[in-house]
Image (spheres, rainbow, N blue to C red):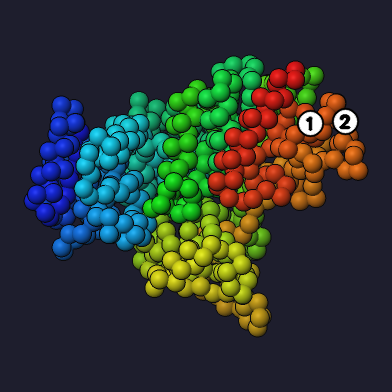
Amino acid sequence: MARPVLLTVDDDPGVSRAVARDLRRQYGERYRVLRAGSGAEALEALRELKLRGDPVAVLLADHRMPEMTGVEFLERAMDLVPRARRALLTAYADTDAAIAAINDVDVDAYLLKPWDPPEEKLYPRVDEMLRTWHDTPDPEVAGVKLVGHRWSAPSFRARTLLARNAVPFTAYSVDEPEGQRVLAAAGAGPDDVPVVVTADGQVLRHPGEAELAAAVGLGVDPQEEFYDLVVVGGGPAGLGAAVYGTSEGLRTVLVEREATGGQAGQSSRIENYLGFPGGVSGADLAERARRQAVKFGTELLLTRDVVALEAHGPKRVLRLDDGRSVAARAVVLATGVSYRSLGVPGCDDLTGRGVYYGSATTEAADCADRDVYVVGGANSAGQAAVFFARYARSVTLLVRGPSLEASMSHYLIEQIAQIPSIRVRTCSTVVGVQGDGHLEAITVQDAQSGERETLPASHLFVFIGGAPRTDWLDGAVVRDARGFIPTGPALVHDGRRPPGWSLDRDPYFLETSVPGVFVAGDVRADSVKRVASAVGEGAMAVTLVHRYLEER
């Protein structure tokens, strides 16, 4: 394979030569450093590299260029080399403009000019991008193919499972010629979809989630019988607990029913997370955290649901949905919340067929030139509206309340107001969905007048609050009336500890009514529903786990 390419784009010949010189000095032995004088020239170079099959690792584009800005180039380059890492070169005076501009493109970093000395201001950022590029499998090499139907719920679930677990794959429709060729080669037919062909030629017809996960190399079986710590849930709180647990020497396994990242992993862009001034996609943040946890030694157990918790002396046992179990000295529950069902006629039959819970970013391409509807008034709904506005003809945000101010961050409200294709309809609720095999229309009711209106629609994305995933804990730990789990001081009433409490101390701050079982993130009663606080609680839970284990 040819050496990977580092491509720089700058219309200033002096700057272009300088950045190429510094890159060649540091990376010239392992990478090819190419430079272009305009966005159009760079795109042509990328097309030639793509045709030859030459890998492109990093793109560095100047912010201010005539005819095509750096942001515009990076956005168009994503279609040609989606795996390449992207950075924007900008002057100090343009920092705010650069940060605002790169919100439209999933850029990895921006670099200030001049970058002298490069050892401090250039190479560390490029090193980080190269590490990320090398850690991301090449979809063309991986060779996983998925043939499905556009309006098939099982096909949607298979695409989502692969995408959210960062498994590179190429999706084909059963109606297109290439999809039919893949089916013929696999000895399968349209009635077998979704059909997955793995890199080694294994054919899966209509696979279940665990079967599909195992076939593409995800961990689905526990490697040990006993651990120091079991983390249930792979959202920000669970990943935070896993990173701190393994980095501090605990044998840790993380059990996740779907994919790492949780609801945050489905966010198209998180812009108020500390340390990412240009914003970061939920998927990217989740993938970084996953790699970090694995680097320290966390074992990931995916597509496995926990169905029961049992305490046997000092041992905590978690029963899995496949009949097996994992045991540990301590447990962190970080199961998060699930989006509540829309609960209107026709909704269940059309879920995955035009009605989606969460961003469902795998459906973005199908939204091109269509009118899309997003239900909800919190940040997740606003982020989805901004994301789908890049693809759809129009996006209508349906909000039950009279305004966005009560539930959405100010920066996001301002951003939505600046996008002409987004319309906000307040005091509006969806009271019905219609369609034959897939979504075709929705019925919206005005809360003030009671008037109902039926609107044609092909895509409806629902963000209407979350319900905790705790039914499986009924009778095992104390839960409140809504299913959330109280911890620490909330369990002590009039000086009385929770029933069955066996230790001569009060429960620690994040500890449940069962000693050694802790809670972090959104599933905890009265928690702050923010990504940063969830990560912090995951780290804090591990500190309390250590304190608990020292008592044993």
Residue 346 as seen in the image, left or right of residue 192: right
Res 242 visible: yes
Specify few, some or many for label 2: CA neighbours under 10 Å numbering under 14, 14-19, or 20 or more: few
Q: Residue 548 placed where, x, y %?
A: 72, 25
Q: Residue 79 placed where, x, y %?
A: 27, 50
The amino acid sitting under disc 2 is Gly
Residue 244 as seen in the image, left or right of residue 306: left
Q: Is residue 365 above or below residue 288?
A: below
Nearer to the camera, 224 or 87: 87
The amino acid sitting under disc 1 is Val
Q: Is residue 92 above or below residue 552?
A: below
Specify few, some or many for label 1: CA neighbours under 10 Å numbering under 14, 14-19, or 20 or more: many
Q: Residue at x 39, y 73 (%)?
A: 420
Q: Residue at x 57, y 78 (%)?
A: 453
From the image, tell me which residue sits under label 1: 514
Mark sitting earlier along the chain (2/1): 2
Nearer to the camera, 277 or 32: 277
Nearer to the camera, 469 or 538: 538
Q: Residue 169 placed where, x, y %?
A: 36, 39
Between the residue at mark 2 and the residue at mark 1, the CA separation in whole angstroms equals 8 Å
Q: Quadrant of residue 182?
A: top left
Whether residues under marks 2 and 1 lie with C-beta atoms below 8 angstroms apart, the answer is yes
